[in-house]
Amino acid sequence: MMEKNEKNPYGWNFDNSYARLPETFFSKLSPMPVILPKLVILNLSLSEELGLYPKALQKDGGVAVFAGNKLPEGSEPLAQAYAGHQYGYFNMLGDGRVLLLGEQITPEGKRVDIQLKGSGPTPYSRGGDGRAALGPMLREYLISEAMYALGIPTTRSLAVVTTGEAVIREAKLPGAVLTRVAASHIRVATFQYAAHWGTLNELKSLADYTIKRHFKGVLDFPNPYLHLLKEVVKSQAALIAKWQLVGFIHGVMNTDNMAISGETIDYGPCAFMDTYDPGTVFSSIDTRGRYAYGNQPKIGEWNLYRFAETLLPLLHEKEEEAVGIAQNAVTEYTKLYTENWITGMRTKLGLITKEVQDKSLIEELLDLMKKYEADYTNTFVALTFHNCAGTPLFDSTEFSDWYKQWQTRLNSQNEPEAAVRKLMMDSNPAVIPRNHRVEEALKAAVDDGDYSVMNRFLKVLATPYAHTIIQAEYAKLPEKPSCPYKTFCGT
């Protein structure tokens, strides 16, 4: 571990470039102090990666920062303004219970946001108390770190502290504050806010800032704003394909939950799919299935069109020309997403070469998985190790026929069996944050103050492609529940 530096006891190295944007994009204010902060989990490896000193962070002064009771040196806290589409309807939004402390500059020169979630009300709270309950904050910590280990771009969780205060939701719940780390918190909804309520110069300043922070390579193009759009299209196509490949369901793909950086952001009613079904929905408020697993790619495209609309004044002075430019750029999304998805599915099936019939081979397997209600993750693990027996899917004659086709396809590429096995092992996680295991960990922590269950789970999730004996234990399915599993936003 890094040793404490007496001149900088915690390692904070803040800059505040977002605070130098026009003030229409934020409100400056400080976190609301809490009564009795207690650190319950600290991400040691992430701390060191950020240039922080874990030992010092675990002491009172470090915990006070995570609770919002003390500002780190150089911090200029602010709540970000944004406006976007929630379930298809446009609303004025903003950070209602979140404050951006500033941007940590890491030892490698990387710039990342440090944000407190649950730090008190802001001008954008819309009547809310600005606080957060312990369960949802631990949930975000667990899922975001699992996503990171799976190799999926994501915000990360640095720490969770309890506040010593209760929050009132459906009942009294223990309060908590999460410290979140992100490439940035610039969202599609940030651009929607600028386009709707800002001036053209303010919109341009946001676009220029975003380009300099995330897409410096487009500065040399004649129209950098077009290439900003293209880069965001490209990154979202890659991101959502990665979600689909591991059975991740975000649950609330509103435009305020779509980060321009290409990271997964805001782990509210998210969950991982067990039984394969494109219609799977977990969120208790998504009653019409807008954000079902199978709809995520289309919603990604819908959100990109909303982003493109905000850039129209920057793409061309004539609106008709701008619309055509934007449409051409976003139209590439479906092609890019499909390429990313098929490439990923090929690796899950050990296909090193490319053949035209691969798409139909993949789709036929998925259709059988749906028909026989097969577990998504475990099916691919079983294929990896040729352990295909003992389930309705594997015992069916249809699967037997498919398996023969797959073996013929594998043999046609003339690749060593060891290379195919390694590719599949590296592409098919042995363990995911299964819903019953997540609930088990959260219940132990929230109800009993026992974090050992969560810590063990985090350790197992940290190497999802290791395929160890203990991971096999975590891959076991729960008994079939009497009612569908539901998740909640945790506000």
Image (cartoon, helix red, strand yellow):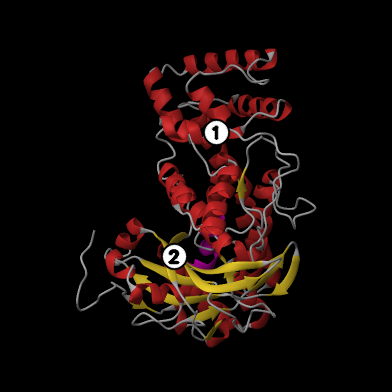
Left-right relation of 314 to 149: right
Residue beneath disc 1: 345
Q: Position of residue 23 (x, y in %)?
A: 53, 87
Mark 2 vs mark 1: in front? 1
Name the kind of residue labelled 2 in the image: His
Q: Tell me what residue is drawn at x 47 percent, y 21 percent.
A: 385
* Rendered position, 472 above or below 317: above
Q: Tell me what residue is drawn at x 73 percent, y 27 percent.
A: 371
The quarter of the image holding the C terminus is: bottom right
Q: Which residues are the magenta region?
A: 221-234
> Which of the pair 418/98 is nearer the observer?
98
* Rendered position, 194 above or below 216: below
Left-right relation of 64 to 192: left
* Rendered position, 187 above or below 287: below
Residue 469 appears in which quarter of the rendering?
top left
Q: Position of residue 95 (x, y in %)?
A: 59, 75
The answer, for residue 114, to whether it is visible in the render is: yes
Q: Tell me what residue is drawn at x 48 percent, y 34 percent.
A: 430
Q: Where is residue 303 in the image (x, y as percent from the top left)?
A: 66, 60
Q: Tell me what residue is drawn at x 68 percent, y 68 percent.
A: 169
